Amino acid sequence: MKQMYFIINLQAKNGRCRKVWEQIEQQLTQYGTPYKACYTEYSGHAVELTKAIAQEEYEEEKTIVVVGGDGTLHEVVNGAIGHSKLTIGFIPGGSGNDFSRGFGIPQDPLAALKLILDESPKNVVDIGRISAGTTSHYFINNMGVGFDAAISDDANHSKLKAKLNVLSLGSLAYAFIVIKKLFTYQSTDMWIKIDEQEKQFKQVWFVTLANQVYYGGGMKIAPNASATDGLLDVIIVHNLSRWKLLSVFISVFWGGHTEFKEVCMLKGKKVSIQTQKPVIAHADGEIIGNTPMEVEAVCDSLTIITGKLEGTG
Ligand SMILES: Nc1ncnc2c1ncn2[C@@H]1O[C@H](COP(=O)(O)OP(=O)(O)OP(=O)(O)O)[C@@H](O)[C@H]1O
């Protein structure tokens, strides 16, 4: 039988992931399912735990189930790269949970566990590789440069958001951060090369490279993205006033932003982003540094347990 490991971030969703894990633990005990539980103790720990599990001496394939948010999954993906005997499952326990939306995983923790225990379809999916200088970084959902990364940066450090999260009002704090950034963020010119085509874009607010449809907690940033097409969807928002940017940002919730002439929707395998001055970037909502960056869709690199994938017909 496959060895099953759980990597759990009890701090996800401001500590409310603990309740999710308690439910899962209870169910596993009821089923008599053997497993090992590993708890993350600090930021970056899930990368180390994943690498250690991958290297454990055990002949059979292993399944690592993440119980937490997209940030914890992001770390597990980065630890799992290059280990072909690992399969990854996910039980949503975070605030955003965009991965579960895009990869057809139920939001209900027990239903997500059932999907894993039923040996549901395993899909080999694409991921994105970001190269900046000598370092490489991987993402499963999306990466972004500019306004949205600046918002993620503020949100990750916001004391107000942490306090309001406890009262389930985290999105109020997020809206406050968006408005603040709307008045302070400075757009910049960028040179974006997609496969062999290079183009200069004036006053770019943000560029998102998406492997799946959702980001920012349910926003349909890339309605046509697919994690199995070998390509990244490239969304460039440029040359518009602060007020129009707000309309674009709001319309992303239902995918209406694609109708704006200032929103350029492209697809490609290799994308290079150069900017007039260094611009902050995120991968799956985690800040990873500044431009310039080279990004590539890496095919067939990760095996995950999913529901029905969007964009696969
Ligand atoms: N024990 C810990 N203490 C503090 N931070 C931790 C701990 N374990 C993991 N982390 C960090 O917590 C951050 C947020 O976790 P995660 O993304 O899983 O939850 P979330 O932010 O609530 O969900 P989402 O990303 O879906 O919105 C991650 O960047 C991770 O590195």
Image (cartoon, helix red, strand yellow):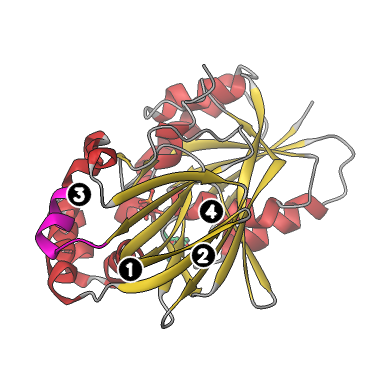
Q: Is residue 136 left or right of residue 292?
A: right
Disc 2 to disc 1, C-alpha distance: 43 Å
User: Residue 209, image x and y in percent?
Assistant: 47, 52
Which residue is identified by label 3? 248
Residue 257 showing in the rendered view: yes
In the picture, the quarter occupied by the N terminus is: top right
Picture residue at 44% right of the left edge, 33% below the top: 102
Which residue is identified by label 4? 74
Which residue is identified by label 1? 202
- Please tell me which of labels 4 and 3 falls first in the chain: 4
Disc 4 to disc 2, C-alpha distance: 16 Å
Q: Under 8 Å from ligand 1: the CB of mark 1?
A: no
Q: Circles 4 and 2: CB distance less than 8 Å? A: no
Picture residue at 82% right of the left edge, 54% below the top: 55
Q: Which residues are magenta?
A: 239-247
Q: Of 95 and 254, which appears nearest the observer?
A: 254
Disc 1 to disc 4, C-alpha distance: 31 Å
* Ligand 1: quadrant of the figure: bottom left
Q: Is residue 26 above or below residue 190?
A: above
* Residue 244 among magenta residues: yes
Task: Give the amino acid type for the residue marked by disc 1 in the picture.
Answer: Lys
Q: Circles 1 and 3: CB distance less than 8 Å? A: no
Of badges 4 and 3, nearer the viewer stands 3
Which residue is identified by label 2? 41
